[in-house]
Amino acid sequence: MKNNRIYAGLVFLLLLGGCALKVTAVGEYDPILDESIHNIESQTAEHYDLVISNKGMNDGSYSNQKAFYSKMRGEVQALIIRAEIIENELKLKPLTDNLNELLLQYKDLELLHQISEEGSESLVTSFESAREATDQSFRAIVKYMLYLKWNQKQPVLDEE
C-alpha cells in the first residue's frame, strides 16, 4: 500500500514536471521560404505547360529546357538548407523531407525529359503523371507552411 502511494506520487511529479517543459513540435514560419516555394511552384507549372504544349517543337525540347532543371535543383537545394536550419531542433523534419522528395522529383523529371522521344505521346503522358506527383508534393509543402503560419499567430500561454 505504501509502495503504491510512492509510485503514484512519482508518477504525479513526472507528469507535473512534464507539463512545465516547453516542447517544440513544429518549426518556425519563414515568409521567405514560403514565397520561394510559391515561386518555384509557379515556374514548375509554367514548365509543364510549355513542354506539353510544345511537344515536338524546339521550345519544349530537353536541350532548350536544360537550364530550367539546373535552376530548380539549385533553388530547391537552397530551400532545403533553410528548412534544415528552421527544423534543426525538431525530431521530425517534414519540410526538409518534403523538399528532399521534391528535389528527387526534379532529377527524375529531367531524366524523363532527356530519355523521352521529343514529340511523342509518351512524353506528354509521362509529363502529365509527373505533374500530378509534383503537384501533390507542393500541396503537402504548402499545407505545412500554412500550418506554420497559422501556428505563429496563435497566442502563447505564459509559463508559470
Image: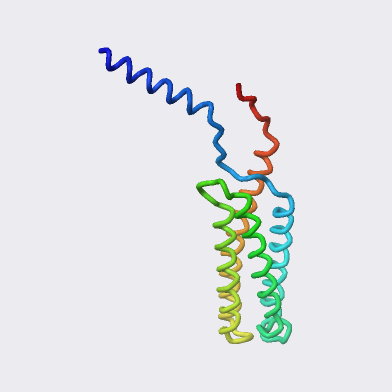
Instruction: Name the residue located 56 percent from the left edge and 64 percent from the top edge.
Output: 133
Where the N terminus falls, by quadrant? top left
Instruction: Name the residue located 61 percent from the left edge and 67 percent from the top edge.
Output: 131
Instruction: Return the residue found at the far left.
Output: 1
Residue 144 image offset from top left, x and y in percent: 61, 48
75 or 117, nearer to the observer: 75
Q: Quadrant of residue 60?
A: bottom right
Residue 46 image offset from top left, x and y in percent: 72, 69
56 or 89, nearer to the observer: 89
Instruction: Return the residue found at the far top.
Output: 1
Numbered circles on residues, count? 0
Residue 123 image offset from top left, x and y in percent: 59, 80
Where the C terminus falls, by quadrant? top right
Instruction: Name the residue located 70 percent from the left edge and 36 percent from the top edge.
Output: 153
For residue 79, side relative to residue 111 (left or right): right
For residue 152, side relative to residue 116 (left or right): right
Q: Quadrant of residue 14?
A: top left
Residue 43 image offset from top left, x and y in percent: 72, 67
